[in-house]
């Protein structure tokens, strides 16, 4: 675990208000500066930015309205952490009447990159949502579309850019961010966002009043298209009973959470901790991805009293947590599965992608799966029983080779027959 931030080792202050002239008048927004210190009081994460949110919500009379949620002058950044090679960095901000925003940032070899953002807005805030039909906190996950940034490089974006998800438009400008700061000094090397390219003209961040009004001086920069989500990295997980390994798993995991727009979340093995329990007839593997996602796999033995026994995947449950306070945002469970069956004492393998339907809104995708929940010997996988998809591939290759050889033999035979006929024709008497 990385060093934890204390009140004495970090600072966050709100800069002077920036007044922006909108279509209908002046609009106020605040900049936030977060400087996180490690245990040696050296800067490990620095961020300075401005943002606001355009949120569409349903009113009591059934109409849909768009409101603007801004950072307040009393914003705090409790829960922000430095991160390290195995733990994601986190920038977290709390503001207004129960609103919060955070972004987790992961480190990968020589780069760092935002993974996903979490926005929680509270419709009980009547100043922002005066007649909201739905009351209470609403949490939205948004995939960060920005690409990786080299370590020891600061990400800078002066012009405004927006990220849309569901009924939310996030607007950012005057952004300076560097995660995993080296030697306690923010770098002078910059990576600029597409909006800051030389061909881009400065833009004014839109408000709910001018969001649909086209600027008269210059067209705003086109938003950066989201990058396609790559397959997740493969992780190796194990459980022990005493000093003996009792559960082995190798798998890449990806969550598909369907909201108004699908959200794909790759489970990062570097930040994932395995827990669970081994038993004679049931075994459970629980994976905790950086305290925000919990995935549980429960296996059982079929016909425990039979002479020949098989195991299978019986249940999968998924829980998404609020990274700031650990509260449950959503939960999904399917305890009526019958997947990944193999003979007891062997392992199950499936290199191809598989999909587990947890409920109508949540799917778990697996890649390069190899798992053995029972009778592990010498900390090694037993002989694997392959899934049908892999078996089909293994069968198709020799079949294709056999068919090709068959055609070749037929062609040789036909050529031989033709050659013999020509030879006989040459010796016929006239």
Image (cartoon, helix red, strand yellow):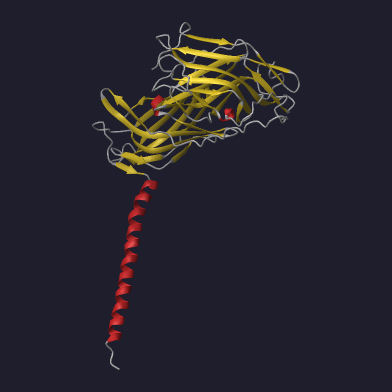
**Residue lying farthest to the right in this orientation:** 24
**Residue lying farthest to the top in this orientation:** 8
- On screen, residue 121 versus residue 64, left or right, reads left
Q: Is residue 41 above or below residue 430?
A: above
The residue located at (40%, 9%) in the rendering is 40
- The foreground one among 240 and 46 is 46
The answer to whether residue 280 shows anywhere in this view is no
Q: Position of residue 188 (x, y in %)?
A: 48, 19
- The foreground one among 392 and 6 is 6
Q: Is residue 185 above or below residue 59?
A: above
- On screen, residue 66 versus residue 240, left or right, reads right
Q: Position of residue 422 (x, y in %)?
A: 31, 81
The residue located at (41%, 24%) in the rendering is 271
Could you tell me how many numbered marks the image carries?
Answer: 0
**Residue lying farthest to the front in this orientation:** 198
The quadrant holding residue 214 is: top right
Q: Position of residue 193 (x, y in %)?
A: 55, 28
**In the rendered image, which quarter contains the N terminus?**
top left
The answer to whether residue 153 shows anywhere in this view is yes
Q: Position of residue 88 (x, y in %)?
A: 44, 22
The residue located at (39%, 26%) in the rendering is 270
**In the rendered image, which quarter contains the C terminus?**
bottom left
**Residue lying farthest to the left in this orientation:** 378
- The foreground one among 114 and 396 is 114
- On screen, residue 293 versus residue 406, left or right, reads right
Q: Is residue 356 above or below residue 203?
A: below
- On screen, residue 185 versus residue 167, left or right, reads left
The quadrant holding residue 13 is: top right
């Amino acid at each position: 675990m990385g060093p934890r931030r204390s009140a004495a080792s970090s600072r966050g202050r709100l800069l002077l208000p920036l007044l922006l002239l909108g279509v209908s008048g002046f609009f106020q927004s605040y900049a936030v500066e977060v400087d996180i210190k490690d245990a040696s009081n050296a800067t490990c994460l620095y961020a300075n930015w401005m943002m606001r949110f355009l949120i569409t919500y349903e009113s009591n009379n059934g109409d849909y309205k768009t409101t603007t949620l801004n950072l307040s002058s009393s914003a705090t950044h409790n829960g922000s952490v430095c991160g390290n090679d195995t733990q994601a960095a986190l920038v977290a901000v709390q503001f207004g009447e129960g609103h919060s925003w955070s972004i987790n940032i992961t480190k990968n070899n020589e780069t760092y990159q935002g993974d996903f953002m979490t926005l929680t807005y509270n419709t009980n805030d009547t100043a922002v949502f005066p007649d909201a039909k739905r009351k209470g906190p609403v949490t939205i996950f948004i995939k960060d579309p920005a690409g990786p940034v080299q370590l020891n490089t600061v990400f800078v974006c002066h012009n405004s850019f927006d990220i849309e998800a569901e009924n939310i438009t996030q607007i950012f400008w005057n952004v300076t961010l560097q995660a995993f700061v080296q030697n306690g000094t923010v770098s002078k090397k910059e990576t600029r966002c597409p909006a800051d390219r030389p061909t881009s003209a400065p833009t004014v961040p839109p408000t709910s009043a001018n969001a649909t009004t086209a600027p008269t001086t210059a067209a705003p920069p086109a938003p950066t298209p989201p990058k396609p989500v790559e397959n997740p990295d493969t992780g190796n997980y194990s459980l022990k009973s005493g000093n003996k390994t009792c559960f082995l798993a190798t798998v890449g995991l990806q969550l598909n959470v369907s909201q108004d727009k699908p959200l794909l979340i790759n489970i990062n093995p570097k930040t994932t901790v395995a827990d669970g329990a081994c038993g004679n007839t049931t075994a459970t593997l629980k994976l905790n991805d950086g305290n925000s996602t919990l995935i549980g796999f429960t296996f059982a033995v079929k016909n425990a009293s039979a002479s020949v026994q098989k195991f299978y995947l019986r249940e999968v449950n998924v829980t998404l947590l609020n990274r700031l306070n650990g509260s449950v945002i959503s939960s999904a469970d399917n305890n009526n599965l019958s997947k990944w069956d193999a003979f007891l004492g062997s392992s199950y393998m499936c290199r191809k992608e598989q999909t587990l339907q947890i409920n109508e809104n949540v799917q778990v995708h697996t890649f390069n799966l190899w798992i053995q929940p029972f009778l592990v010997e010498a900390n090694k996988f037993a002989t694997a029983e392959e899934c049908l998809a892999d078996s089909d591939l293994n069968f198709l290759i020799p079949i294709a080779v056999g068919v090709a050889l068959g055609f070749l033999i037929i062609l040789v035979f036909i050529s031989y027959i033709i050659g013999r006929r020509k030879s006989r024709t040459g010796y016929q008497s006239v």
